[in-house]
Amino acid sequence: MRNVNFLSSKGIDVEKGLELLGDMEMYEEILSDFLDQSSERLDNLSKFKETNDLANYSILVHAIKGDSKYLGFDKLAELAFQHEIESKNNNLEFINDNYNELLKEFKRIIGVIQLYLDQ
């Protein structure tokens, strides 16, 4: 049995995830899916930013926001939401200025999930 308190101690709102997803088995399955997609998402995030492809950047941060809300990653959801809004407004300056914060939180969440699932 995994230690759910580990997730809570890392700022993840597991209760919110359980409200939306029903039970721990489903929650952990979605966590695993999020982790499986994370490498490709990180690569695409960087690629879309570097090529100023704000349309696809917006679609990707929207998806990250949605998954993060379901899983209780409140900070990542909020950061992704800000990037979604600003990319739709073609605000490249905001994205460039705040990209590292988004990336840092995304990578932090990935690390937490890996540690949790490896328990």
Image (cartoon, helix red, strand yellow):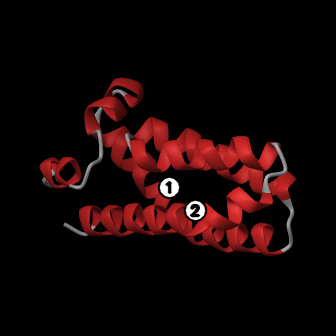
Disc 2/disc 1 C-alpha distance (Å): 5 Å
Kind of residue at badge 1: Phe
**Going 59% across and 62% down the picture, which residue do you hit?**
98
Task: Give the camera-side residue of 20 and 44.
Answer: 44
Which residue in the structure is indicated by mark 2? Answer: 37
Which residue in the structure is indicated by mark 1? Answer: 34
**Going 39% across and 61% down the picture, which residue do you hit?**
109
Crowding around mark 2 (Cα neighbors within 10 Å: few <14, some 14 to 19, many 20+) is: few
Q: Position of residue 37 (x, y in %)?
A: 58, 62
At mark 1, the secondary structure is helix
Task: Give the camera-side residue of 65 and 30.
Answer: 65
Kind of residue at badge 2: Gln
Side (left or right) of 5 relative to 87: left
Q: Position of residue 55 (x, y in %)?
A: 86, 52
Task: Give the camera-side residue of 33 and 95.
Answer: 95
Q: Are marks 2 and 1 in contact (CB under 8 Å)?
A: yes
